[in-house]
Image (cartoon, grey):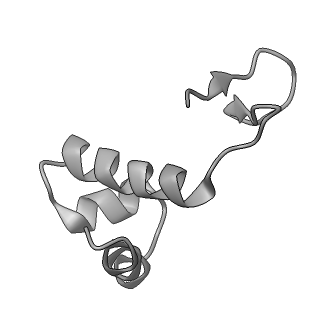
Amino acid sequence: MDLELSTDNNPSLFKLPEQGLNWEDHEKDCLLQALEYTNNNKSQAAKMLNLSYKAFLYRLEKFSV
């Protein structure tokens, strides 16, 4: 499911699709993309997602990444 970029004056980066989305799939995808962008550097990936390192590691464990 692709997220649409917002084009109105709403400060959001994307609009939630009318049909909704699977939050856990979205969260896991964000984690994987951050790891890919940072060449698997977990500290940098956590910063990219504005998460503490500990919170980032928790989410990796949550999704068995």
Q: Residue at x 30, y 58 (%)?
A: 45
Q: Quadrant of residue 2?
A: top right
Decide if residue 57 is on the left or right side of residue 22: left
Q: Which of 4 and 12 is in front in this view?
A: 4
* Residue found farthest to the top: 7
Residue 19 vs 58, above or below: the answer is above
Residue 1 drawn above or below residue 28: above
Q: Is residue 31 left or right of residue 42?
A: right
Residue 53 vertical position relative to residue 36 in the rendered view, above or below: below
Number of numbered labels in the structure image: 0
Residue that protrudes farthest toward the front in the picture? 19
Q: Residue furthest right?
A: 9
The residue located at (54%, 61%) in the rendering is: 24
Q: In which quarter of the image is the N terminus?
A: top right
Give the quarter of the figure containing the C terminus: bottom left
Q: Position of residue 22 (x, y in %)?
A: 62, 51
Q: Is residue 33 left or right of residue 41?
A: right
Against 11, is 53 above or below?
A: below
Quarter location, residue 55: bottom left
Q: In the image as oriented, which residue stretches furthest toward the left?
A: 39
Residue 47 percent coordinates (x, y): 38, 61
Q: Where is residue 43 in the image (x, y as percent from the top left)?
A: 25, 68
Image location (x, y in percent) of residue 56:
38, 73
Residue at the spot 67% in from the left edge and 45% down from the top edge: 21
Task: Quadrant for residue 53, please give it.
Answer: bottom left
Residue at image position (49%, 53%) is 25
